[in-house]
Amino acid sequence: SIGNLQAQYALPFFPELKANVNIGYDVGKANRQIFFPNDLAAQIRQGHGQLQLQNNTQANSVLETYLNYSAALGALPGTIDLTGGYSYTQQHSDAFTYNSTGLSSNLLGDNGIVPADNVTTNDFVTDYRLISFFGRLNYNIHDRYILAASVRRDGSSRFGAGNQWGVFPSVSA
């Protein structure tokens, strides 16, 4: 399932300042079953049947909030656009696999687990998080020249230990 909600609010007594919130999620599930009976000619030569079950789940969520101020400058020519915000992203996945070969019976098919010569299971779980604080300043002079500066401070579970936070500045003209 997928969902997203976005809201923007401008203060009636300060219309140049707008608050924005964006919340979203995405959840997916996939199940797979593979069954080769042990009495098929090809399976007799290769190990007497196989049953494989896979259950995979992935969930992503995001929260973004920011304030934006945009207005003309009275003392200087042009306009200023200032944005500052916070972002949180989380990803979780779980992938379980059951595999058996050398099935003792075909009685249950892919509806159950029977004794087998070789059984393996794997469960892979991953969790990632990204947290960001960001700011941007744009100065537009008569729609002809733009000066811009931005900075992000990101914290990620994917960055190495002791280096989970980084600062990423930029300036342009």
Image: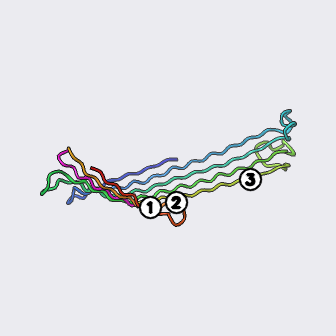
Per the model, the C-alpha gap separating discs 2 and 1 is 9 Å
> Dot 1 surroundings within 10 Å: few (below 14), some, or many (20 or more)?
few
> Dot 3 surroundings within 10 Å: few (below 14), some, or many (20 or more)?
few
Per the model, the C-alpha gap separating discs 2 and 3 is 29 Å
Instruction: Name the residue: 49% across, 54% down.
Output: 61
Which secondary structure, mark 3?
strand
Is disc 2 in contact with disc 1, using a CB cutoff of under 8 Å?
A: yes
Dot 2 corresponds to which residue? 159
Which secondary structure, mark 2?
loop
Dot 3 corresponds to which residue? 121
Whether residue 18 is visible: no
Residue 142 inside the magenta-drawn segment: yes
Residue 166: which numbered mark, if any?
A: 1
> Dot 2 surroundings within 10 Å: few (below 14), some, or many (20 or more)?
few
> Of tags 2 and 3, which is closer to the observer?
2
Q: Decide whether the magenta segment is chiefly helix, strand or loop.
A: strand
Residue 74 inside the magenta-drawn segment: no
Mark 3 or mark 1: name the one nearer the start of the chain.
Answer: 3
